[in-house]
Image (tube, rainbow, N blue to C red):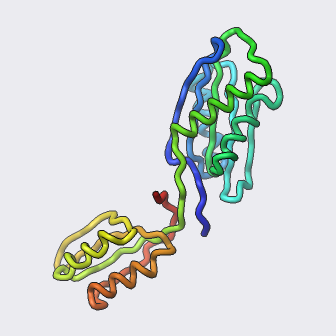
Amino acid sequence: MNAYKTLATSGEAEFTQQKSRFIGRAAPAADEAAALAFLAGIRVRCRDASHHCYAYIIGQNAGITRYSDDGEPSGTAGAPILGVLQAQGVVNAAVVVTRYFGGVLLGAGGLSRAYARGSAAAVAAAGVALMQPCRRYLADIPYPLWDRAAHALGSFPCVQEGQNFTDRVTVTLLVRSQDAPGLLALLARVTGGRAEAELVEEAYAAWA
């Protein structure tokens, strides 16, 4: 499992250029079906728009790359939108730039710049997240040892996602895969080997 970059969330940005209104929208897309559903939703919601130009990249190796000018002159819309995604290095992401034509022709260069601007603004609004391979553990710690363990965990690069207190403390811990051996060693050290940690799943998660 290797780290990759994608969009942190959905984002939207709008601007007007020579009376044409451009709205850029960006969203994470786990697969091509999600990217197409994102596009379809915008087409329905903004059915009176002149164009819905788009690009998406799916797969950690960018195995699926698609873009469309949607009626704009060839090469003036889809490719500039895609270029922004590629420059940011993001995958599993889709961008749609909607245009409401304002009656003034922008020319090929003007269109390319406008669609690139719409794409860049949408990506900036969504934000870029570094997804890293992580492991999620369910740790079981004797209650008398919890304060010591909690103090140690507070200075370790992991995320506590939930706690349950009885005569023992169960806590869900998310940690980067590269830091997992250190986490297990820390729990063993501060509890004298009395903590138990069960691997729940391996998954990707955004990590600052």
Decide if residue 205 is on the left or right side of residue 160: right
Q: Residue at x 67, y 40 (%)?
A: 84
Toward which corner of the image does residue 26 lie, by quadrant? top right
Which residue is at the far bottom? 192
**Residue at image point 59% right, 18% down:** 16
Q: In which quarter of the image is the N terminus?
A: bottom right
Q: In which quarter of the image is residue 102?
A: top right
- Residue 161 to residue 127: above or below: below
Q: Which residue lies furthest to the right in this view?
A: 74
Eyeballing the image, is 95 above or below 1?
above
Residue 122: image location, x then y, percent: 57, 35
Q: Is residue 207 above or below residue 190?
A: above
Q: Nearer the viewer, residue 57 or 149?
A: 149
Q: Which residue is drawn at 60% across and 59% down?
A: 4
> Residue at the location (72% across, 41% down)?
83
**Residue 183 image point, x, y percent:** 39, 78
Q: Nearer the viewer, residue 184 or 40?
A: 184
| Image position, residue 147 (x, y; %) | 19, 76
In the displayed structure, would residue 79 be above or below residue 3?
Answer: above
Question: Residue 160, image x and y in percent?
Answer: 33, 66
